Image (cartoon, rainbow, N blue to C red):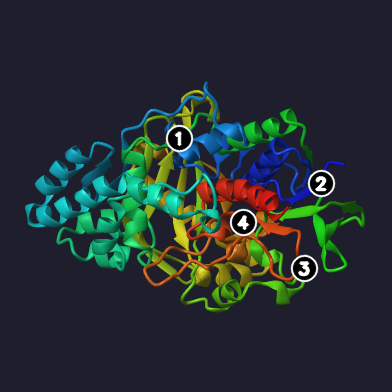
Amino acid sequence: MTERIVVVGAGIAGLAAAIYGRLAGYDVEVFEKNAVPGGECTGWDRRGHHIDNCIHWLTGSKSGNALNDVWLTTGALGDDTEFVPGDKFFTARIDGREVTLWHDLDRTERELSALSPADAGEAKRLMQAVRQARCCEIPAEKPLDMMGVLDYLKMGLRMKDMPKVMKVYGDVSLGELAERFKDPLLRMLVGAYMPADYAAYAFIVSYATMASGNGRVPRGGSRALALRMSAKLEEVGGRIHLSSPVKRIRQHEGRVAGVILQDGTEVASDFVVYAADMSLLFGGLVERELMPEEWARAYKDRSSYPVMSGLQVAFSIPEESVPSGTTLFACAPFRVGPREASCLTSHCYDYEPTWAPEGRAVVQVNLTQSDADWEWWKSLGKADYRTSKERAAAIFADRLVSAFPKAADGLELLDVWTPVTYERFCGAYRGSYMGFKATPKTKSPSCKGVVEGLPGLYLAGQWMTNPGGLPIAVTSGKFAIQRIQRSK
């Protein structure tokens, strides 16, 4: 008799687990609380425009590496997938000056040095670290706890230059790295794209991923990628149930026996892969006492394990009124809740012409959010929450038009979403759209993807390893199935 796996959550991790489960010969059913698959890898439509929530670059988009094989196996990418042309990471602008992190690292180094000769040495060191970090790969063949000596040797050879990066930048935050530069534009370029407490090496690896060609944007964006994976699951014989929230994980004689849905329906299974937000599992679907100690400490220690979210506003603008792609721009100081800021990030999606009416484009303006921001948004009553979103949208519109005056022509507000939106839609812990931040002081909670004391329950999702994101999600789904197979 074929063994059965129930997957809780149809985000990228859950879809990957279900697909790999079917390919391994298991009977697989997925239960998702929302009406669409994809979790945070999604998008939505507003008044003839499409708003994309997730992919600014997809790590593993270059062929010839193990992560790319996972994307291909799950149907997220295919041989016919087209990618958006691009030649830059992002541009920073302040006081009429701008500078860009190009995919061409030699070009970037020349421009940084010409912009500020006093910072040429620091710029050269940074670009050298980015060149070295191009070798960095996310383990995608098997989880670390299943690797042998030979696996570690191979991984070490592939990433032989990463220790050099970590030696120089491993204990440095982005804010500290930014202070090494004298020019205010370069300090902003380095220190304001991600939160100041973020690990410098995480920023370096992100830039290196794009510069190496391994971080491209697939046409159609986030929702299209998730729908391709959902179609792949159906193609291989898996079943997905939308608008079907799980209330409890069934247990019998000390092991997993399936799930109980919100409507009371009981679904039996031999294994359960939990692929939703980890904060909802322990104390919700299973007993709180089953949470691994390292995770319990991380959730309790808010200062050492911070999270990150975003306050985001989408506008319809005239084509070519805002630079394509990502721009970090200085602006007049403002305050939203506990957060004071003097810069914002815009991302213009004019490279997807079907996402807006002819002659128009979608631009999203983002302000990163912290634990304190989530607490403030969460404390607001319904009326104050709505008013605060409207006020934030007005501030963002004013700052966008001040930086890019042509955007004022027919500027139209499309949507506003906050950390509370991520919490409501995905159950995201404190509204975090990734896992715990990667900071120099944060050690990723160690979890082998199983729950001690409850055999048959396996874990997947971006919370498995800091800082989360799509690569961690998709590989964790694959790893969950490998662990099930090893357990037999």
Screen quadrant of the N terminus: top right
Residue type, label 2: Arg
> How many angstroms separate mark 2 from mark 1 (CA)?
32 Å
> How many angstroms separate mark 3 from mark 4 (CA)?
23 Å
Q: Which mark is residue 127?
A: none
Residues at discs 3 and 4 in contact (Cβ within 8 Å): no
Q: Quadrant of residue 385?
A: bottom right
Q: Nearer the viewer, residue 115 or 251?
A: 251
Which is more N-terminal, label 4 or label 1?
A: 1
Q: Quadrant of residue 192?
A: bottom left
Residues at discs 2 and 1 in contact (Cβ within 8 Å): no
Q: Nearer the viewer, residue 214 or 150?
A: 150
Discs 2/3, front: 2
Which is more N-terminal, label 1 or label 2?
A: 2
> Within 10 angstroms of label 1, few (less than 14), some, or many (20 or more) residues?
many
Q: Which mark is residue 61?
A: 1
> Which residue position is annotated with label 2?
4
SS assignment at label 2: strand
> Which residue position is annotated with label 3?
286
Residues at discs 1 and 4 in contact (Cβ within 8 Å): no
> How many angstroms separate mark 3 from mark 1 (CA)?
36 Å
SS assignment at label 3: loop
Q: Is residue 95 visible?
A: no
Left or right: where does residue 20 sit relative to residue 168? Answer: right
Which is more N-terminal, label 1 or label 3?
A: 1
Discs 2/1, front: 2
Residue type, label 4: Tyr
Residues at discs 3 and 1 in contact (Cβ within 8 Å): no
- Residue at x-position 45% and y-position 35%: 61
> Which residue position is annotated with label 4?
422
